[in-house]
Amino acid sequence: MQAERSEQLFALAQTVMPGGVSSPVRAFRAVGGTPRFIARGKGAYLYDVDGNRYIDYVGSWGALILGHAHPAVVRALREAIRRGTSFGAPTEAELALALRIREAFPSIEKIRFVNSGTEATMSALRVARAATGRSKILQFEGAYHGHADFLLARAGSGLATFGLPASAGVPSAWVQDTLVAPYNDLEAVAALFERFPDQIAAVIVEPVAGNMGVVPPKPGFLEGLRDLTRRHGALLVFDEVITGFRVGPGGAQGLYEIKPDLTCLGKIIGGGLPIGAYGGRADLMDLVAPVGPVYQAGTLSGNPLSMAAGRATLEQLTPVLYQQLEERAAQLAEGLRAAAEEAGVPVRIHRVGSMLSVFFTEAEVVDFATASATDRARYARFFHAMLTRGVYLPPSPLEAWFVSAAHTDDHIARTLRAAREAFREVARG
Ligand code: PMP
């Protein structure tokens, strides 16, 4: 496979953009090699600037549940763009999308659109702090809720109670109110509530973790969080930026039947255009300006193009489509498991709906520590073996793969053929 043009562009890009990219994982640092510069996408395929074609399982990091350039989305965008790109004023399109989301998420009584998942979580937690008059936020190790300063925290060692900055440029004071517990560890959460009575404003959680690879909640984990937050007067915030409209029509909260106080959305609701949203109980959302005292605003928020692409996408998401996604993703996961076994490569495959991960390990993966302990070098070899065979996987062992409605049985079969060879290559070392 030839990547000459990508190599040239990447060399030049690195002279003008940090790492040559607009977002770090794209630089292939976790797997090595040259990131492919993408010329276009159509359906299940990505096409790079060297003319290579790949079956894509990144789908713009989960945003493209219908695949690339879906005709209905392109049509909606064409119509919207003719009417103008931004008005900085209310539109019917944002109202329609808000109503559609509320219909799918009964916990969302009111919603505010923003431009990214980062803004959604940052703003939702501002509301949580205002509503409770408390400052501390509890998040989970290995979660990603965007890059707001106070959420770039990692667990302190041992008995340290405060979070430590997970990024340079974040003063320790910014994360001193951020507590970090291991994912799937209710006891740790309970202990933090005991230790900081009446101080925790909210627990924010990815109801299916997607940023340490896919790690599903253990049975009882989300219920336990709901119970603990309620008992301690804290809010439960679901970060469904990935899982919203992904793991089912009502997101993870619909799937597991848990009602959070606030929900963060992004990705799919924008149909591949920039978007984020946060919503929840009306009494909480009415704390947001201009009704309430919590300030939050955005020049391009509710952008008509994002609204149009989002609406067109959500219109396609029928029960039949979710059934088909479920079946295809199951087929893929099962096939990968069989292929790995055949090659004698131990793996753990996690799947919830159409998001999945392959961890190279024999051990159980339940949290960030166990996900990080998997064989990442093996993933990198597998990644390149697949890329060479025309399958584009996330360029990191700790990111989710996404199946889209554009993946057909034939795409899955071809992916599995490539995987059988790739696992054998990994086994040879
Ligand atoms: N929350 C979750 C769960 C995410 O996966 C992401 C991004 N992948 C974000 C928040 C941040 O969203 P954005 O990149 O749109 O700021």
Image (cartoon, rainbow, N blue to C red):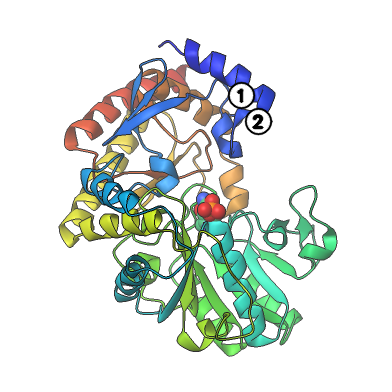
* Local SS, label 1: helix
Q: Is mark 2 within 8 Å of ligand 1?
A: no
Q: Position of residue 154 (x, y in %)?
A: 72, 56
Q: At label 2, which amino acid type do we have?
A: Met
Q: Position of residue 190 (x, y in %)?
A: 64, 77
> Which residue is located at x 58 percent, y 58 percent?
118
Question: Residue placed farthest to the left in the image?
Answer: 320
Q: Does residue 148 appear in this view?
A: yes
Q: Is mark 1 within 8 Å of ligand 1?
A: no
Q: Position of residue 10 (x, y in %)?
A: 57, 20
Residue 13: numbered disc: 1
Q: Is the residue marked by circle 1 packed among few (<14), some (14-19), or many (20+) residues within 10 Å?
A: some
Residue 168 or residue 8, whichever sits in front: 8
Q: Does residue 246 appear in this view?
A: no
> Which residue is located at x 54 percent, y 20 percent?
34
Q: At label 1, which amino acid type do we have?
A: Ala
Residue 197 or residue 177, whichever sits in front: 177
Disc 2 target residue: 17
Task: Classify the position of the N terminus by image quarter.
Answer: top left
Marks 2 and 1 in Cβ contact (< 8 Å): yes
Q: CA distance from mark 2 to mark 1?
A: 6 Å
User: Is 139 on the left-hand or right-hand side of 63?
Assistant: right
Please tell me whether residue 150 is drawn above or below residue 225 in the rendered image: above
Residue 409: numbered disc: none
> Which residue is located at x 79 percent, y 47 percent?
168
